[in-house]
Amino acid sequence: MESGVILSAKYAFPPNRLKYCGANSFQNALASFSKGTASASLLERELKKFRVQNAYLRLIARCSGLKPFDKKVTEAFWLGNPILEKVGENDLRTFILRNLFGPGLLSASRAKKIASRIRPGCSPHHSFHALFVGSATGKMRRTLGNASSCLVRWGEVESALDGKAVVRASGLERKNGKVIFGRPRSSLFNSPFEKLHRGDPVSLHWDCVVQKLSRRRLANLKKWTLRNLSAFNRAEAR
């Protein structure tokens, strides 16, 4: 059964593989866990080394009265669910100024700028981080292409074989002064976790298919991503 730790580990894998966040030891811990030679507690200790992800999980957990690796919390951050409503704009603004600012994270001036751009509709879903923050650690250049890859996007499998899948999905682009999802395109992704079939709706993070999505999860991912994208465009237009 998928736990909050396992769900979080799957989404943490692609950027860690690219050395954008987390510790190098995470890959070995995940491989050992997959083989049954390591416990979920080891995986959770490794996930706590993802400073930014862990900070968002603590924020959502604190506002919802749950624990950071409760499945509802990790699902809220990566895919979206109703407990995000419990985090208000002031909670999010204070979080940026206090928890994403400091040595190895945002500078004071950048944290203040991001906090000042928070608009109604912003929520601590991963799409907020991809759009408004980008890389808090400075390991990734802030470009629209990187924001698009960093977003947990959705797509449909066209073909799959031997740990690879061709998925049709939309990426971000600029049009008439706004950031939008463009026309869907077919691209090749790694598929490290699940056996896929043509027509499967899936989530994408960086160069990987993370998992097949239920109708509920697909609807939530679209809802919370588009809410943050709308808020981002309002902030850009200011």
Image (cartoon, rainbow, N blue to C red):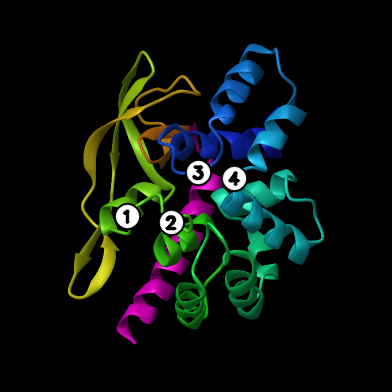
Counting from the top left corner in percent of width and height, residue 101 is at 57, 67
Residue at the image position 52 percent from the left and 39 percent from the top: 11
| Callout 1: SS | loop
Amino acid type, residue under disc 3 in the picture: Cys
Tell which circle, 3 or 2, labels the residue nearer the N-terminal end. 3
Q: Measuring 58% from the left and 65% from the top, which residue is drawn there?
A: 102
Check whether the beta carbons of the residues at disc 3 and disc 4 lie within 8 A of each other.
yes
Reading the image, the residue beneath label 4 is 50
Using the image, tell me which numbered label, if any, was put on residue 21: 3
- CA gap between label 1 and label 2 equals 7 Å
The residue positioned 64% from the left and 71% from the top of the image is 98
Question: SS for tag 4?
Answer: loop
Q: Is residue 2 left or right of residue 155?
A: right
Pointer 2 residue:
135
Residue extending furthest bottom? 238
1 and 2 marks in contact (CB < 8 Å): yes
Disc 3 element:
loop
Q: Which residue is mark 1?
A: 141
Label located before the other in sequence (2 or 4): 4
In the rendered image, the vertical position of residue 228 relative to residue 89, given as above or below: above
Q: Quadrant of residue 60?
A: bottom right
Alpha carbon of mark 1 to alpha carbon of mark 4: how far? Answer: 18 Å
Q: CA distance from mark 3 to mark 2?
A: 9 Å
Residue type marked 4: Phe
Nearest to the observer: residue 231 or residue 213: 231
State the extent of the magenta-drawn residues as a range. 211-238
Amino acid type shown at disc 1: Arg
In the rendered structure, which disc, 1 or 4, sits on the residue that comes first in sequence? 4
Residue 56 image offset from top left, x and y in percent: 62, 58
